[in-house]
Every structure is written in C-alpha cells, then in structure tokens.
Image: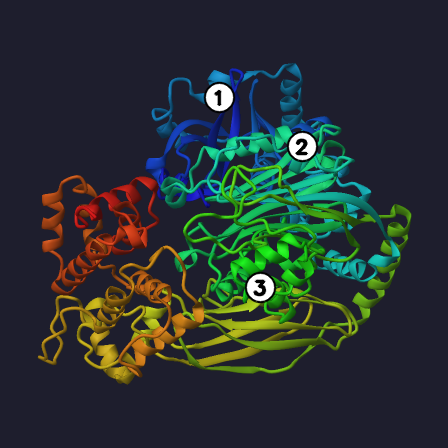
Amino acid sequence: MDQSIAVQDTLQADENCIIAVQCDVHLDDKTESRLLGLVQSAKEHAIFIYTHRRMAITADDVSLEDIVPIDLDFAVVEISSPEELVLVGADTRVRVSYKEENLELRLPFGSHSRLFLGEVIRAWSDVCKFPTQEAKFEWISKYRSATKGQGLVKQALAPLGTTLNKLNQQRKTEKLTDKKKKSLEHLKGSDSATHNSNTESQGISSRDGRDDLVRSSSHTPSNKSHILTMPQFGLRDNLIKCELLKNEDLYIYREHFSFFLGTYNVNGQTPKENLSPWLSCTQDPPDFYCVGFQELDLSKEAFFFNDTPKEMEWTKAVSDALHPDAKYALVKLVRLVGIMLLFYVKKEHAEFISDVEVESVGTGIMGRMGNKGAVGVRFRFHNSDICVVNCHLAAHVEEYERRNQDYKDICSRLQFHQTDPTQPPLTIMKHDVVLWIGDLNYRISDLNVNNVKDLISRKDFEMLHSYDQLKRQIDEEAVFVGFVEGEIAFQPTYKYDTGSDTWDTSEKCRVPAWCDRILWRGKHISQKHYQSHMALKTSDHKPVSSLLNIGIKRVNTDSYKKTFEEIVCNLDKMENECIPSVTLSKREFHFENVKYMEHQARTLTLVNDGQVPCQFEFIQKPNETTYCKPWLTASPYKGFIAQGASMDIDLEVFVNRLMAPDLNSGKQEIEDILVLHLERGKDYFISVTGSYLPSCFGTPIHVLCRLREPIQDMSQETLRQLMATSVKETPASTEKPLDIPKELWMMVDHLFRNASKQEDIFQQPGLRSEFAEIRDTLDTGIADSLSGSNHSVAEALLLFLDALPDPVVPYSSYQECLECCSDALQCEKVISMLPQCHRNVFNYLAAFLRELLKNSASNRLDVTIVATIFASLLLRSPSKQDLTEKRKAREFFQHFLGSP
C-alpha cells in the first residue's frame, strides 16, 4: 500500500512527499515501527519520521516525531556484511547519520526499499554538487513544534566519532577525482548523463570515504548479467542484455538445490502439536523451505480487517520444526487473511538471493475479499528467477468452474514489481521456475462416498485419481497448462474429524478428496517425494509435502567475460551501420460491442525486420499523462525484440466502474491513438476504436429511476440528457419516476424468492460467465427473470452498488453519517434527508437484508457480516477508507438491520 499519501496529507501545498517506506527502528534494546517520508520543498530535501498506525492512509494515521535534513552533515550507511545478511534474511540494515548522531533502521527487502534509498542518495548527491550553497531549511522550522520533545533522533542517536567529522570537512573542500565522478554518476543513474557536461565548472565537492558508506547490493559473478536490468543502464546496455540472454547457453551451467514445499489447511486452529513429522521428514536438510497455510484464522476480524495473532503462532511453530541439521533464515512472510506463505533459506545461500518481492490477490466476493485467493513470493537465486504461489480456491464439489476461474484470475492479477521501476511487472509465468502449492479444493466427481472409501481401502489410488477434478481439468487444458504434478500414492487429505484419522462423520459426510496439492513448472526439475503426513491431527486436512531437486542457473565467469566482449564488439559495428525498424501486423483495431466488465483483446504482432535488436515502447502523446486511455492496455507496453524475431502485444479493452459513467453518458468514446516508439528509430501510429453498449452498471440511481425501458433500448441523446440532470432536477418529461431502479428490483426479488436460505450468500463468489448473462438481461430486457446461481446474482447486486457513480448514501452525506454513527435516531434523520430515489433504495435494501437475517441459521449470515459488506458499498468514501471509517460506517448501517 502507498503510504506516501498519509505523509503528503501532513504537508503544505508547496511541499511534496517523493516516497515513503515503513521500517523498524532500534531504540533502547527494543524495536519499534516507524514511517519514513522523503519530503522535498523547492530544492531542499529532508526525511520526516512518523509514528503510525498499522495502515497509514491519511494524516490522522501518522504523528510527526522528528525531521532529518539532507545537507552536508547528512549520511546514510547501508550495513550489509555477509554475516548480517544471513541473520536478517532479505531485510536491509541502514544507518542514518546527522552531524555526530546516528540511527539504525531495518528496511524490508524489495524494490520499494531500494527505490527509497535511491531517492535519498539522489537528493544527497544533489547537495554534494553545490557545497558552497548553504541550505536554509526554514520550511522545516514550522514542523518542530509538532515533534515530541527532542525528537526521535535526539533520544536515540549516539556520537559517530571524529571520522565522520573529518569526512564532512573533506566534502566541503575537495573536488571529485575521476573515480568519484563515476561513482556519483552510478548512484544518480540515468540522470548523470545530463550533468556530465557541466559538473567540472560547477566545482563538485568530494565524496572521499563515502563510497564504502553508501553502497547498493553487491554483484557477484553469478548475477552480472542481471545487473543490466537496473535503471542506470540505457539502450546500449539493454541491447547487450538482450544478446546475453540469447547466448545464455554459452556461459551458464546448472547446479542442483533441494526445495521443500509444504501445504496445510489448518481450519482456523492454533498449533497444538510439533510439526517436525511434516517439516523434518527428509534425511538431509533441504536448501529451501516454502511452507503454505490456508484458513489460518476463520474469525470475522481476520476476514474483514486482515488482522490475526495466529500469524506469529504458526510462524514460530514452523521455525521450531525445520530440519535440525541446518540453520535457516526467514526471508519473507506474506499473508492475505488466512492464506500465508513462509520462505526460508539455508544461511549459506542467503547472500545469493536478490530481487525478493511479495504480492497477494483476493478472488473472493467481487474479486476482492481475501477469504479465497493467493499470495506469492518471487526471488532471484544466482541466475534463476523463481516464483512460489500459495492459494486457496473456491470450495464445494460442484464449483470446479469457479476454481478454474480463480486460477486464471490469480495468473493474470498476481504481478510483481521489478527492480527497475520503468519495467512492467512480472507475471507468474515470466519466471524460470514456478512452484504452486495450496488447498486447490478440487474434489472427486462421479463417485459416491462409499465407492471412494472402498478404493482408498484397496489403495487403488490410480483408479481414484481418474475421477479427480484437477486431473480432468488439466487433461482438458483448462488450468495449469505446462505444470507437472507427481504421482499421488497417498490417500486423500480431506476431510477428517479433527483430532483423528477418521473420515468425516458429520451430517454432511464429505466425500474424501485430494484438496491439498503441489505442482511445478520449469525445466531441470525432479521430484524426490510427494506425500501426506497422517501423524498430524490438528485440522480436518492432512498436510502435504514435496521435495524437489531444481537445477539453478549459475555463471561461468570466464565464459561470461568472453561472450560479453564478443557481443560488445559486434554491437559497436551494428550500432554504427544500422537503424532499427519493425513491421506491424496491423495499424487499425476495432472493438465491437464492448460491454461492462467484459474483456476484449486483439493481438498486434511486431516483427523486427532490421539488422539490430530493437527497443520499443508505447509513449505518451502531448498533453497526456499516460500512453493510452484508462480502458485500454498494451501488454507488454515496452520491451526488446531480437534481430529477426517477433513479439505479440495484447491490446485489451476493459471497462470498469471508474470508466463506465462517462461511456454510458456518451462523454467518452472507445477511441484512442497509440504511439509506438523505437529507440533510435521512428514512431508508428496505431488506431484503436470501438463501440460501447451502455449499461445499468455505472449509471446514476436517479437516471435509472427515469428509465422504464432497458437502457440499451434508449437513444444516446436521451441518455445524454438524463445524465446531464442532477438528482434534484426534473427532466422535460413529466412521467413519474420509478420508486427504485427496475434492475435493482429484479436482483433483490430473485434473491428474496430463491436465496433467503442459501448457505454463504454474499460471501461466496459467482461465475463470471453467469454475471455476463445477468448483466445482459438487465441491460436488454431479453428475459423476464434472471438466470445463473444465487451466488452469481448476489455478486451482481454488490457490483451494481459498487458501480454507482454516486453511492446510495451520496458522497455529500458521507461525513455526516460517520459523525452520528453511534446515535440511532440521528442516523435515521440523516437517511430521511436523502434525495427521494436514494432514500427509497436505502430503505428497500435494509428491509431485504433484515429478511435475510431471519434465516441466519441456514444462510450463515449475521448482522456483523451483512453490515460490513453492505456498509462499504452504501456508504462509500470519496477517498480511501481507513479502518476507523470502516468501523464507523458499519456501526451506522447496523442501526437499520435490527436483530436477526
């Protein structure tokens, strides 16, 4: 989450927070969390230090504690000896110094921390260029009264010694040697080229002694080729990188390492037994551990606010159970509600790990809730890029299509930022090795429970596996194309009576199934074991493990040097003789009948018909901030094409709730021009047009109440006129408006008649294909009733409310609702003052939800769940809600739900 917004809220109009990062600060033998913001005013920079809440979104979530000016008395030291790296896994220790004081910080490893350090170094480098210009920092003085006492720095900083004082004096009197110039240019990245012509005349001061104080990650021979992806390398180096990758076989060899993969659905339980039978089941200690959990915490607090004490309980249980014959470091922990992934490495391998990033994606209701979804970690080990995914897919036997959809959503939406911020994010499949673990929830089909148990008793797992949904879906190439799963020679891992090895004896008597699975994708991988662990009885699932032997790419230094030199020699000749060019498969693309939340894609093929590799990028047009309209994306939007090679670019059109209102009203159209730029070459222009079918999704309530016919039966001019009227205005037509939108009535009436007792209603997602049918029915009136499952209709209702340009409780009344949230009478008064159509919709929905709550024993809803889900849609904030606002909104809406 971008916490620089919270810092920006504390600043004045002429001040800017460039970047913010959360870190740990060491104070009096204890560690506390702080938020650091790099703030700029004119040409001056300072680091603002804040105490903060867990999720800092606005100024109310942070409190200024101290300010460190970036001037000639400032220093930043990265502490990264090999011994320390092993102890901290992937984190980065930094010492910030000012005058004779210093403060030790621990930054989470990843591109964001590197970006923060890079921006700080960039700001300090600018100061060093003008040593005679004294910084005034008068703008900081107005903040001093806001800090606590002497401030964090005065409380915690200790004298640095006379060495730093001498360095400060040297910086004020000496000029840079040639070697120092190059070092400064390296730190400043691509901007250095623009300063080379005038640095001598401006008298750049010395950085003597600072080269060892400020340094980036060390580059070993095994990752030299990867350096070329860093932002300080321009086109020439990117071309070299392209050629190096093409000729990788000339200097790469493989070394094998063992990866232990484990997955365990713990059913919301706390650790009650030693995990060693699962995690220490191998004779030799593995080089890596990737351990995934699902259903870590089933509480409502975890579901809605992603907060749970069980994270640390299970992390400790895992750390205590790792193989006793080796020492491990926890590199990364990532969690989304109850889905958690732990990544450990043997200490001797830690220094060869880089580019560690984590991401998560929810696939629950509305594609957001994190009760289902995935977490992932990606990293580079020597010269191999590896991605590990832990997922929890949709439940229930009949929902295999929903599981397929979850898998595809995870593959498309789980994206990792690269070290070079100018490069597009990495998707899961863009890695050399992908390791996929989790509760995939695929079940056994077409066999009753007795037949399944009979096959299990005879250990006929091959026959039983032929009825496995995942196997069937893989065979049909519906999911996990290119993945491999080892032979299953163990009995199903679900469902058992908790605390035993007895199959489910509950009223539902679930059919046993292999829900918990481990798959992989990549070359040079062999599996040493794939098994379940019956000894653990904490959950209704059994844990599963796999040991993989993976061939990792390493660099032969001599061969690399020879290949590198040959490429550089050939490139010099090619650069002098050739201009890059490409052939486009098409210059015009048309998207017919674009619909709300429905992807359409076309493929643009680029063929490099020139004599050199080419670098392309879609660039911004004059007076525009992005290269394309928000409903359009090009993937990839930049890249390299080797000589004689080709690349397919997906042009995708997708209209979401932010774009729909203007397209519905006709203010915007599906029309854009893409500019494809070749470095050192010419520009190509690509036309993108289309037609958009207006939808009730993204149309204001007061407009829908004026539409007695389906929206797609209305003329564009009629819609334009209605959209132009405000909620309080009366259009030219005197026809009485509907009390509520007919589309809303159709969805609520369907749910009232069919889904009052539906288990997990409003908590389980529907199918995207069924949503499309529901949307088309509402927009065209082609049917008198809605098709699709109850879950799909319920999700469509939530998406409808989410897409309203002005919520049911208008933005203008939002703050008033929060202020009176604890007073029931005042809450009712606020609703009574809403515009008529908004008031009708609010009361109609509240009455419907009260009826649902009367059946809570069947549908498993309660007031807290309903209030939390619907309050976030009916009382939407004009900006992002913090936790306090979410709780106030929930409290407000609960007054209208009564008792279940």
In the image, what residue occupies the spot 54% across and 45% down? 541
Report the side of 85 relative to 845 (left or right): right
Numbered tag placed on residue 322 in the rendering: 2
Q: CA distance from mark 2 to mark 1?
A: 39 Å
- Residue 900 in sight: yes
Residue type (three-letter) at the residue carrying disc 1: Val
Q: CA distance from mark 2 to mark 3?
A: 33 Å
Mark 2 burial class by Cα count in 10 Å: few <14, some 14-19, many 20+: many
Counting from the top left corner in percent of width and height, residue 700 is at 24, 68
Give the mark toward the camera: 1 or 3: 3
- Circle 1 is placed at which residue position? 153
- Circle 3 is placed at which residue position? 469
Whether the residues at callouts 2 and 3 have beta carbons within 8 Å, the answer is no
Counting from the top left corner in percent of width and height, residue 713 is at 27, 85
Mark 1 burial class by Cα count in 10 Å: few <14, some 14-19, many 20+: some
Q: Secondary structure at mark 2?
A: loop
Counting from the top left corner in percent of width and height, residue 457 is at 63, 52
